[in-house]
């Protein structure tokens, strides 16, 4: 029903953003909310997918059309729901995902939360023939926070938890992330996802 919304991002949360379109706030679940910044001066365009279930209607937001198309391909795989698809898309290495599908790399795919061997095999089976149609999206460019004196790191860790990574896994990478010289939530989130999918 919706293709995209254009407006101001008024809330950035670890698992969603709110975009104000002519005075109406739409809550959009996104893979990496921190690529967006709260601003009443700069409008953004966020591509949208609407999921309707028996007792729920949810909106999912995407940085560009290619990312939305990849999400749609993923949720059409048996065993992949919107939350799992977002967790897969949160990793900035989409070429890694595409290469894993093309190369039958089940081990790579099982590193994402909620993806077991059976589901990973199903992803490969369903998407291998469509892999040439997948264009690598322009990925996440956003600011970030940290723990205590590092609010950017704290926001990145909250986003990892929102994506479905276990607390133990998040705390393990948190120790490594604190040693980095980065200062944005997006950089922390990117690096954390790289560490979690190694």
Image (spheres, rainbow, N blue to C red):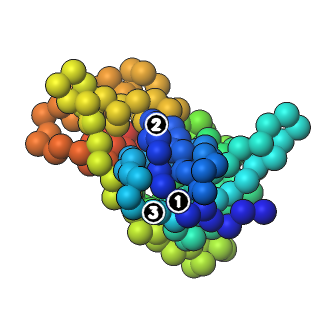
Residue 109 lies, in percent from the top left, at: 52, 49
The residue nearer to you, when weighing 55 against 43, is: 43
Q: Which residue is mark 1?
A: 7
Q: In the image, which is nearer the foreground, mark 1 or mark 2? A: 1
Q: Earlier in the sequence, mark 1 or mark 3?
A: 1
Pinpoint residue 131: horizontal percent, then vertical percent.
59, 72
Helix, strand or loop at label 3? It is: loop
Q: Earlier in the sequence, mark 1 or mark 2?
A: 1
Residue at left offset 41%, top offset 69%: 138
Q: Is residue 104 above or below residue 119?
A: below
How many residues crowd around disc 3 within 10 Å: few (fewer than 14), some, or many (20 or more)?
Answer: some
Q: Which residue is mark 2?
A: 13
* Horizontal and vertical percent position of residue 48: 64, 59
Alpha-carbon distance for marks 1 and 3? 5 Å
Instruction: Kindly tell me whether residue 117 is visible in this rendering.
Output: no
Q: Are marks 1 and 3 in contact (CB under 8 Å)?
A: yes
Pointer 2: residues within 10 angstroms few (<14), some, or many (20+)? some
The CA span between labels 1 and 2 is 17 Å
Residues marked 3 and 2 touching at CB (< 8 Å) = no
How far across and how far down the image is residue 177, in percent? 22, 35
Q: Residue at x 45, y 63 (%)?
A: 43
Circle 1 crowding by C-alpha within 10 Å: few under 14, some 14–19, many from 20: many
The quadrant in which the N terminus is found is bottom right
Circle nearer the N terminus (3, 2): 2
Separation of marks 3 and 2 at Cα, in angstroms? 18 Å
Q: Secondary structure at mark 2?
A: loop
> Which residue does the numbered mark 3 point to in the structure image?
43
């Amino acid at each position: 029903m919706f293709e995209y919304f254009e407006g101001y991002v008024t809330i950035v949360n670890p698992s969603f953003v709110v975009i104000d379109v002519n005075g109406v706030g739409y809550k959009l679940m996104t893979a990496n909310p921190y690529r967006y910044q709260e601003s009443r001066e700069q409008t953004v365009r966020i591509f949208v997918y609407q999921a309707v279930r028996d007792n729920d209607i949810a909106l999912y937001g995407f940085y560009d059309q290619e990312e939305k198309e990849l999400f749609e391909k993923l949720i059409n795989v048996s065993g992949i729901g919107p939350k799992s698809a977002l967790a897969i898309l949160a990793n900035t290495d989409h070429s890694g995902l595409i290469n894993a599908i093309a190369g039958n790399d089940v081990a790579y795919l099982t590193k994402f939360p909620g993806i077991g061997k059976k589901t990973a095999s199903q992803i490969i089976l369903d998407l291998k023939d469509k892999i040439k149609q997948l264009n690598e999206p322009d990925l996440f460019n956003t600011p970030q926070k940290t723990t205590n004196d590092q609010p950017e790191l704290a926001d990145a860790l909250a986003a990892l938890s929102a994506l479905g990574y276990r607390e133990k896994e998040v705390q393990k990478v948190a120790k490594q992330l604190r040693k980095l010289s980065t200062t944005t939530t997006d950089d922390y989130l990117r690096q954390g996802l790289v560490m979690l999918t190694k």
